[in-house]
Amino acid sequence: MSHPHPELGPPPPLPRDALRIVALGGLGEIGRNMTVLEYDGKLLVIDCGVLFPEEEQPGVDLILPDFEYLRGRLDDVEAIVLTHGHEDHIGGVPFLLRERNDIPLVGSRLTLAFLSAKLGEHRIKPELVQVAEGERHTFGSFDLEFFAVNHSIPDALAVGVRTPAGNLLHTGDFKMDQLPLDNRITDLGGFARFGSEGVDLLLSDSTNAEVPGFVTSERDISGVIDNVFAKAEKRVIVACFASHIHRVQQVLDAALAHGRKVAFVGRSMVRNMNIARELGYLKVPAGLLVDPRDLDELPSDEVVLVCTGSQGEPMAALSRMANRDHQIHIEPGDTVILASSLIPGNENSVNRVINGLTRWGAKVVHKGNALVHVSGHAPAGELLYVLNMVRPRNFMPIHGEWRHLRAHAQLAVLSGVPEDRVVIAEDGVVVDLHEGRARITGVVQAGYVYVDGTSVGDVTEAALKDRRILGEEGFISVVIVVESTTGKLIGEPQIHTRGAGIDSEAYDDVIPKIQETLERAAAEGVSDTAQLRQLVRRSIGRWVNESYRRRPMLVPVVVEV
Amino acid sequence: MSHPHPELGPPPPLPRDALRIVALGGLGEIGRNMTVLEYDGKLLVIDCGVLFPEEEQPGVDLILPDFEYLRGRLDDVEAIVLTHGHEDHIGGVPFLLRERNDIPLVGSRLTLAFLSAKLGEHRIKPELVQVAEGERHTFGSFDLEFFAVNHSIPDALAVGVRTPAGNLLHTGDFKMDQLPLDNRITDLGGFARFGSEGVDLLLSDSTNAEVPGFVTSERDISGVIDNVFAKAEKRVIVACFASHIHRVQQVLDAALAHGRKVAFVGRSMVRNMNIARELGYLKVPAGLLVDPRDLDELPSDEVVLVCTGSQGEPMAALSRMANRDHQIHIEPGDTVILASSLIPGNENSVNRVINGLTRWGAKVVHKGNALVHVSGHAPAGELLYVLNMVRPRNFMPIHGEWRHLRAHAQLAVLSGVPEDRVVIAEDGVVVDLHEGRARITGVVQAGYVYVDGTSVGDVTEAALKDRRILGEEGFISVVIVVESTTGKLIGEPQIHTRGAGIDSEAYDDVIPKIQETLERAAAEGVSDTAQLRQLVRRSIGRWVNESYRRRPMLVPVVVEV
């Protein structure tokens, strides 16, 4: 198996009979999935998602793949294939289309509906190519075949890619629930057929590669939800992802069975459920839905609210209910169901929400105490089925952090893929499939691109480093006004601090020190502002370190008049 | 059961025949445990711990209980009882002793040894009173009896308090491993005896009240560790808490069995293991330990490193190894064992460490994939044993967040404590035991006190709010120099931004706007600096919002010359 190659350089030119695979996201991280295939000078993009920032990226709204690798070659892109409608697969599309807006977007009916709604918000009218499982479509030299896969959103696809340089299978995100609510199972038979034809490279979802065994069926959750409804004394509030149509269907079914009305709360929930209902993915019995504003007229034991916020997002309805900062006040006897996974990184915020709801007397049902969620990703037992059905000549784990990629690589080796045919790549690592063999040949730029407010890329790593320092230590700014020719101080230095935990009374200790330093400098004929700034910085830095043992950001400002 | 009482005011004077209980920490949070008992004007403190900050408290080193409730009454404190040697029970003692340094400190042999080492670092020589299980000691009107409890550190104690106003049992932190490595089990028989005498109020550890069932014995971990050692190809690196002497003992035993030498890495690990060894709590076979500097001379399959960093602490050895920022380079074939719990809030940093180690080729064994840790806290099954043995007249869950306190309260009700005798209190809530009945009677100040660098309390909530804004958005500072009498601008406004993601070239857009605003103000005769500051703030704020949709901190500075 390949280990990290810090010594990699730019890749060599691609031989004419080779297929190049470059992931710009999704390898070494969970999110912003994007894979670029290249054959004979033409490109095919599979997915274009976003990553949600962690505490290491303070203040950032979204993280995009770096499109630099595609710039200057956008006209060579034959299509963007979207495997399903989750944000980490489609969220980057509006930003890529800003650079070329007529790239054909290929996906299933629901995927394109979610994508169109998103693009509409960005005022982009896209070129859409709707496809379905079992179909074949050709885009330039890329001959694509689509396979049904089961995931935590309906209508997900895997994509087989036939090229003269070899065949590739990209699973997208999938699991193998054998009794899914919509009876649409992952097409393992199709994988097997494609495998018999010969799959030179398998790219497969690694998210749950560390988890042994098999998923529990979504169907098993229905009984649990029904049980919670049966015992609920007052309102039932269900928080889940706004894209999890099957979970919402289960809630609607339970509400109907227990004589409750349902209100959707939150913009994305309302928008997605409207789309799902119009397209027939969500079945809503007549009279079941009510407007949230009409809830007060119903007795509390006839009410169900469906909202987002299951990840503890501070602005979502659920967090605000937990903080008594929402028109819906949690009362003793209310039941809250967090019917979703806990995405790693959100533990603290979810815990805060659970404690807040509990404090006001709600009973909180979550995956820690009841089977109210199953993962959308195949664990190890199912991944082995895929490896054994496809029997790929080469294997490359995708969609996962290092721990997941390695675990999946290990499974591939156990299933019989030779160790030297298993390629563990990170984002930007170039993998060439040539003469039946996948090899790492180089690396291209694939860093994080930050979206903050309306701008893309303005917020750099340097700005984030500043934010981390400011967020931990605050800053001290010292403004001095000097006579431009002599460098002589005019008036007193002005000190401003924020977040440094320094009382303004303490400024009196340091102002004389700064004045003294500047007097000495003036006497020595120092009048250069850069030098003066440096002197002020040192003087204030020494003081704050000695007095407080802290290291706030130091911002000396010298104004010449 | 009591619900939160936002309407609570200061408590009434304490009747002479009543016992008052005020937790200054540990209720509504996991950490900074501290309970103050009052009888007849005299006080007894049980534990005085610290809380480790989360992302909501950026840059803070430690969080202390607020000692304000004790100020002015420190001479009435008869003693501080320390139930065991963990930081969340003893870490606040040096800070309290700064206010009165001769308060008797009461604890077991190991607890006092750990505490003395800590106080030595603060250059405090304390008054120590060593006690042991089975003993009774009187401090003023407080007649104390100590009971052995089993926890994730040796020599932990529960404390029974007899007063003329009633009897109280405080469990400290405990679990009920029936086959602990040191054969020192929780003295359930003692609890039962005290219960027969009559326990008016039970205060019991709620940390694991949501977890059903019983703990796995520490003994079961030995076999798993032995197995990992047997399979390890190269070095074994074990990360665990520096206070978990039994876990380290298991590692030493496995090392001996597999012909490996052991090196301790890290200041706290070395210090604690020296103390534990001197006092006989850790048995170290002759010749087993080596200096970390001598490791290079041993073949890698004869080496064990024991270090801290199991919580992903960025400065600990393990994180630095994961980042290739430590003299010990992880190589393919190394095995790393994270032999500790994952404290909520540390998920991200631990995940980063696991990914980093995996990336360099280490096999990482952790509680997610092997039984290499068991909790130190009793789950629901064991808590019921305690409730049933003690049969308390009143019950108050301690040591937990709201979710844990409520779950424990529920267990108490199920075990037969009447609902109106179960008191759920938060930090600062005053509970009076009077005429055999515990009731909430008021609330006192019990906020967070932040330690940052050398100072206690300088960093306030306001400073942390500033840090959160700065950390998310950065700042823009605008310095203008004005003629003091006319308010007329001298020279150009100077703009400085950090972390705001604004390029300095963009300043040219806004400087004319500021100048124009100030010219207009000067024409209107505005020369007051506060007004000028406000004008500058508005002008820059409008620009940044319209151009970037961001909200950095705005710091206008007006200098008059």
Image (cartoon, coloured by chain):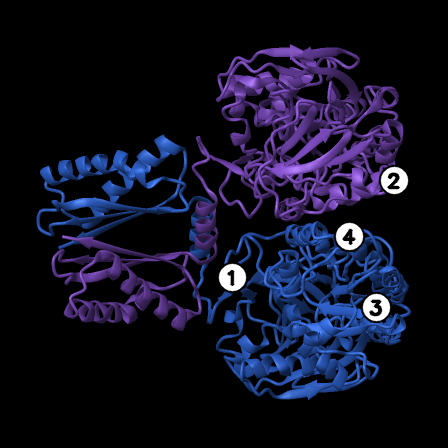
Chain colours: A purple, B blue
Residue under the image location 63 percent in, 66 percent down: B327
Tag 4: residue type?
Glu
Tag 1: residue type?
Val
Q: Nearer the viewer, mark 3 or mark 2?
A: 2
**Numbered disc 1: secondary structure:** loop
Q: Is residue B323 left or right of residue A1?
A: left
Q: Do the residues at discs 4 and 1 belong to one chain?
A: yes
How far apart, in angstroms, are the residues tagged by discs 3 and 2?
43 Å
How far apart, in angstroms, are the residues tagged by discs 2 and 1?
42 Å
* Residue B10, label in figure: none
To which chain does the residue with label 2 belong? Answer: A
Residue position for label 1: B60
Q: Nearer the viewer, mark 4 or mark 2?
A: 2
Whichever of labels 4 and 1 marks the residue nearer the N terminus, that label is 1
* Residue A213, label in figure: 2
Residue A301 against residue B33 in the figure, above or below: above
Which quarter of the picture shows residue A281?
top right
> Crowdedness of circle 1 by 10 Å Cα count: few (<14), some, many (20+)?
many
Q: Do the residues at discs 4 and 2 belong to one chain?
A: no
Tags 4 and 3 in contact by the CB under 8 Å rule? no
Camera sees residue B215: no
How far apart, in angstroms, are the residues tagged by discs 1 and 3?
40 Å
Q: Is residue B453 left or right of residue A475?
A: right
